[in-house]
Amino acid sequence: MQNRTIGYIRTSKNTQDLGLEVQRKALEKFEPDELFSEQISGRKEHRTELDKALKCLKKGDTLLIYNLARLSRSSRQLVNLMSELNEKEIYLKSIQESIDTRTASGRLFFTVLAGIAEFEAENISIRTKEALANSGKQLGRPPIKNNVKKRIIKLYDKKELSLNEIAVKCNVSVKTVYNVAKNEGLSRK
């Protein structure tokens, strides 16, 4: 049986169709036997299409990707995946970084790049946390005010208004109404 090349492409958001198209065209030059595509964060441990791609790879096959960031944003994930591929004698080819793990230098280069990627991700996180601490700002939405919370609870308890109507009256989202009710142990059943 001939060794196969399985392609995998990914973008983080479903609004990045152009990014998928660029990756698709780059991979098609290598004529993959199958191509898996999805739009999901690279930090997610389990990605449906990546899992499918990995399941169909056999000994001697190659996983073809556009670049390492498409495979994962975490060097731990990359290194774990690389170990898994090595154990199964499956190769990795990354177009942008010119990595081909069929060679010893390709395996070394992959390991070095994965370490650098993790180092950079940690530095970005540290810089972001420092900048937030120095600015006194917080990420995320501000906490809901107590008087608004009480009003939501009162309207929710009356059961006269729908969740949408309560949200409009209190100038919050329906999800906020739902979360306040849930946190207070309220139910309309």
Image: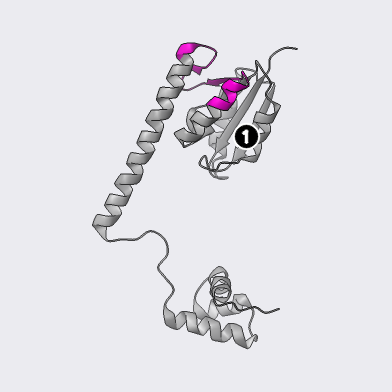
Give the left or right position of residue 167, taking residue 48 as reference: left
Residue 62: image quadrant is top right
Q: Residues within 10 Å of mark 1 (few under 14, many from 20)?
A: some
Compared to 1, does 167 lie above or below? below
Residue 90 in picture, x, y percent from top left: 61, 20
Which residue is depicted at the point 50% across and 73% down? 172
> Does residue 155 sit above or below 51 in this rendering?
below
Image quarter where the N terminus lies is top right
Residue name at image x 24 percent, y 56 percent:
134
Q: Is residue 121 above or below residue 176?
A: above
Task: Name the foreground residue: 96 vs 61.
Answer: 61
Determine the image quadrant of residue 54: top right
The residue located at (54%, 41%) in the rendering is 16
Q: Residue furthest left?
A: 134
- Report the front residue among 3 and 40: 3
In the rendered structure, which segment of residues is drawn in magenta? 83-105
Apparent side of residue 85 relative to residue 113 in the rendered image (left or right):
right
Q: Is residue 98 magenta?
A: yes
Q: Residue 157: horizontal and vertical position, in percent?
A: 60, 85
Give the amino acid at mark 1.
Answer: Leu
Residue at label 1? 50
